[in-house]
Image (cartoon, rainbow, N blue to C red):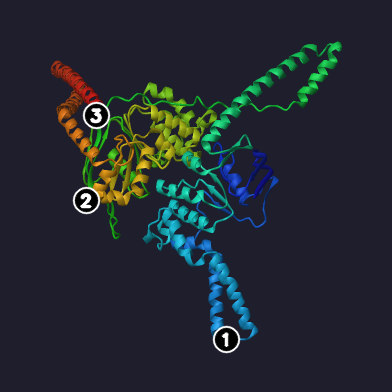
């Protein structure tokens, strides 16, 4: 279907691609990967005919149609409705329908049913109708609606003009139009960037059965693993292909790199040996033949490329966070509404729900776009008002990362200077270069001015700067946007080793499944909580979807309940739905836990309340003691004695709190 032969391409005087060869066949689903700036998007543009190579050629089978989804939204009439833009995919069908209508009008006017003109029009109409039916023209509108709704649009939004939607939503419309066109070769550049998790899952299912070939650029490992049948990696201006998904590619690549290291080291020893011989006997006439033989051998030698720099050692660790209270954040009566002036109010959270985050929770916050993920993150951080109450736990130090932080970096600073401005401790200053290296700022990159950084580079720097501070509660809103595979892996490893509490908003499922032990999903005005990792969440959602009718009947229909009890599996540890007996036993166990731990919980709450009061008092005393006038008034000794007593009380309370917390944890572990 597609053959790329000896492609070479220069950007100014730099060679981006050199003598590149590659083939794609019908049905192939190819993941195009490589470091940022390797030329992935450039290659897609060449295949689509947007740019031409300096050398070589790209050839396709006759009649092959190509569809290309670029990262930037192309020119499109913003006055058109969402559905009208998507329906542009059916240009041929629309033209056929117009001609059928025209022929119908002409036939209605004719009275001579036996004339040649009448019969020619009938034949033409029959051919057009056959083509119209073959292209399923009668159902094109319902097809467009299905694809648009699969990508996240609500039914009432389909007739709204495109100008009402953000760039990300406009990109979804263009993706829908492209999918409805069904080109033979589909080129997708970061198609999941503007999609939420539900839409990504829908796109996966759609592309899995796609009849044509697909080439896609993506940093979404989970998506690549589920989607592709081969990986094409652009590296060092060449392209290397590997069969299988991304996980298989990593295994194959590691094996090839090990072999390359062995071959390179062996050849290096061989070259060194020949060069030593040449240097030693160059001046000896009796050895001239052997010397010339080795010189020619070196000239003809097919040199093994030096192995790429080893990135396996790139990593960073968060500074050890101070221990927080058992409860990190509590939310009471979660209700949030955005006032919209003349337009209807936007009701985000409506159920008056109570939420609680405990020490050690690693929560993935997911949901469709617009369901309130970022709003909830800001509420938890404390910089978003809502109708309820936010209760912060004891000794909570929070770090919050959001994409807008990239816009407040100081433009005239270098990358290193901007990073050092956030390093307020000696320990943090010692970690600056290591963290920058983990986020692809190395060598001379650290001397770049912030003003010349791309949007992706700014986001990476903002995230790196955020992670300098020693916090015990991290709130991360889309931290993996603009990160490549290596940077995501480094961040994921650091989060997995982090002993504090995390809440992260992301649509990158590989990232979420790597650290989360709880899933919070925002939908229908509330937060659905899943007490397990991302794999458990997926199983639970799938099970809930498949058994929805059965689950509803279990609570409402006595006969169905009885049948469920009679046919329930005897294995009490089954991963499927719980029996009535299991639910009763668990309820009894929860009641018993509450009874036996209520005293410890009360002791912890009392300690935390008293410690908060004493810490405030201690801060006031510190402020007074710092005033030089105190030592002139004669009150200094009394203040110092009081300060010492407050410190001793705090130490005693901390011991009580620690003891009670450990007992509670042991008790809960016992019940588990």
Report, in whole angstroms, how far the alpha carbon at label 1 lies from the one at label 3: 87 Å
Residue 261 appears in which quarter of the rendering?
Answer: top right
**N-terminal of the two: label 1 or label 3?**
1
Q: Residue furthest bottom?
A: 111
Say above or below: 445 vs 72. Answer: above
The 10 Å Cα crowd at callout 2, few under 14, some 14 to 19, many 20 or more, is few
- Mark 2 and mark 3 residues within 8 Å of each other at the beta carbon: no
Which residue shows up at 53% across the image and 84% down it? 108
| Residue 440 shows in this picture | yes
Q: Quadrant of the C terminus?
A: top left
In-front residue for pair 254/409: 254
Point out residue 372 in the picture as x, y percentages from the top left corner. Answer: 32, 47
**N-terminal of the two: label 2 or label 3?**
3
Decide if residue 603 is on the left or right side of residue 474: left
Which residue shows up at 15% across the image and 26% down it? 603
Mark 1 secondary-structure assignment: loop
Say above or below: 482 vs 168. Answer: above
Q: Which residue carries the number 3 mark?
A: 326
Report, in whole angstroms, how far the alpha carbon at label 1 lies from the one at label 2: 69 Å
Choose mark 2 or mark 3, whichever is in front.
Answer: 2
**N-terminal of the two: label 1 or label 2?**
1
Choose mark 1 or mark 3, whichever is in front.
Answer: 1
The 10 Å Cα crowd at callout 3, few under 14, some 14 to 19, many 20 or more, is many
Point out residue 587 in the picture as x, y percentages from the top left corner. Answer: 20, 37
Which residue shows up at 35% across the image and 50% down it? 370
Point out residue 443 in the picture as x, y percentages from the top left corner. Answer: 54, 28
In-front residue for pair 243/570: 570
Q: Which residue carries the number 1 mark?
A: 110
Point out residue 283 in the picture as x, y percentages from the top left corner. Answer: 82, 12
| Residue 422 shows in this picture | no
Q: Which residue carries the number 2 mark?
A: 558
The label number, if any, that marks residue 220 in the structure image: none
């Amino acid at each position: 279907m597609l053959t790329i032969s000896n492609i070479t391409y220069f950007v100014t005087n730099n060679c981006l691609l050199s003598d590149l060869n590659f083939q794609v066949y019908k049905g192939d689903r190819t993941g195009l990967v490589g470091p940022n700036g390797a030329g992935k998007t450039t290659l897609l543009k060449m295949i689509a005919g947007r740019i031409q190579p300096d050398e070589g050629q790209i050839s396709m089978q006759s009649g092959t149609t190509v569809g290309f989804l670029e990262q930037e939204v192309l020119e499109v009439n913003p006055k058109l409705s969402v559905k009208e833009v998507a329906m542009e995919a059916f240009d041929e069908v629309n033209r056929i329908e117009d001609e059928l209508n025209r022929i119908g009008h002409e036939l209605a006017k004719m009275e001579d049913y036996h004339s040649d003109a009448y019969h020619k029009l009938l034949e033409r109409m029959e051919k057009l109708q056959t083509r119209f039916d073959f292209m399923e023209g009668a159902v094109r509108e319902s097809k467009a609606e299905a694809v648009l709704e699969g990508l996240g649009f609500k039914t009432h939004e389909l007739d709204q003009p495109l100008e009402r939607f953000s760039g990300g939503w406009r990109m979804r419309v263009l993706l829908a139009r492209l999918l409805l066109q069904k080109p033979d070769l589909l080129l997708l550049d970061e198609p999941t960037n503007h999609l939420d998790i539900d839409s990504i899952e829908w796109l996966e299912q759609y592309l899995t059965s796609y009849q044509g070939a697909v080439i896609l650029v993506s940093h979404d490992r989970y998506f690549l693993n589920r989607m592709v049948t081969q990986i094409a990696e652009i590296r060092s201006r060449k392209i290397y292909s590997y069969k299988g998904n991304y996980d298989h590619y990593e295994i194959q690549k590691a094996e090839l790199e090990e072999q390359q290291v062995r071959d390179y080291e062996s050849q290096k020893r061989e070259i060194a040996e020949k060069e030593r011989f040449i240097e030693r006997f160059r001046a000896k006439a009796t050895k001239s033949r052997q010397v010339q033989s080795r010189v020619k051998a070196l000239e003809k030698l097919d040199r093994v490329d030096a192995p790429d720099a080893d990135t396996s050692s790139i990593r960073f660790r968060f500074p050890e966070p101070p221990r927080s209270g058992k409860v990190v954040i509590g939310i009471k009566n979660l209700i949030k509404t955005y006032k919209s002036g003349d337009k209807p109010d936007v009701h985000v959270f409506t159920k008056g729900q109570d939420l609680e985050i405990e020490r050690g929770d690693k929560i993935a916050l997911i949901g469709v776009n617009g369901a309130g993920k970022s709003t909830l993150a800001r509420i938890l951080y404390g910089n978003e008002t809502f109708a309820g109450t936010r209760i912060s736990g004891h000794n909570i130090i929070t770090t919050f990362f959001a994409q807008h932080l990239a816009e407040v970096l100081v433009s005239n600073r270098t990358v290193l200077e901007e990073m050092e401005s956030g390093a307020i401790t000696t320990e943090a200053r010692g970690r600056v270069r290591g963290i920058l290296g983990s986020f692809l700022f190395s060598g001379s990159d650290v001397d770049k001015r912030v003003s010349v950084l791309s949007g992706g580079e700014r986001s990476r720097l903002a995230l790196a700067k955020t992670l300098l501070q020693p916090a015990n509660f991290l709130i991360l809103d889309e931290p993996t946007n603009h990160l490549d595979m290596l940077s995501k892996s480094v961040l994921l490893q650091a989060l997995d080793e982090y002993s504090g509490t995390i809440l992260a908003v992301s649509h990158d499922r590989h990232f979420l499944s790597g650290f989360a032990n709880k899933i919070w999903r925002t939908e229908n005005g509330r937060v659905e909580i899943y007490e397990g990792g991302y794999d458990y969440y997926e199983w639970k959602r799938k099970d809930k979807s498949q058994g929805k009718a059965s689950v509803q009947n279990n609570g409402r229909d006595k006969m169905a309940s009885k049948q469920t009890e009679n046919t329930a599996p005897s294995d009490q540890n089954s991963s499927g739905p719980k029996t009535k007996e299991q639910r009763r036993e668990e309820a009894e166990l929860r009641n018993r836990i509450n009874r036996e731990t209520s005293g410890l919980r009360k002791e912890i709450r009392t300690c935390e309340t008293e410690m908060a009061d004493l810490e405030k008092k201690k801060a006031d005393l510190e402020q007074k003691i710092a005033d030089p006038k105190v030592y002139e008034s004669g009150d200094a000794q009394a203040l110092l004695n009081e300060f010492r007593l407050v410190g001793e009380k705090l130490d005693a309370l901390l011991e009580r709190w620690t003891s009670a917390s450990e007992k509670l944890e042991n008790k809960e572990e016992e019940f588990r």
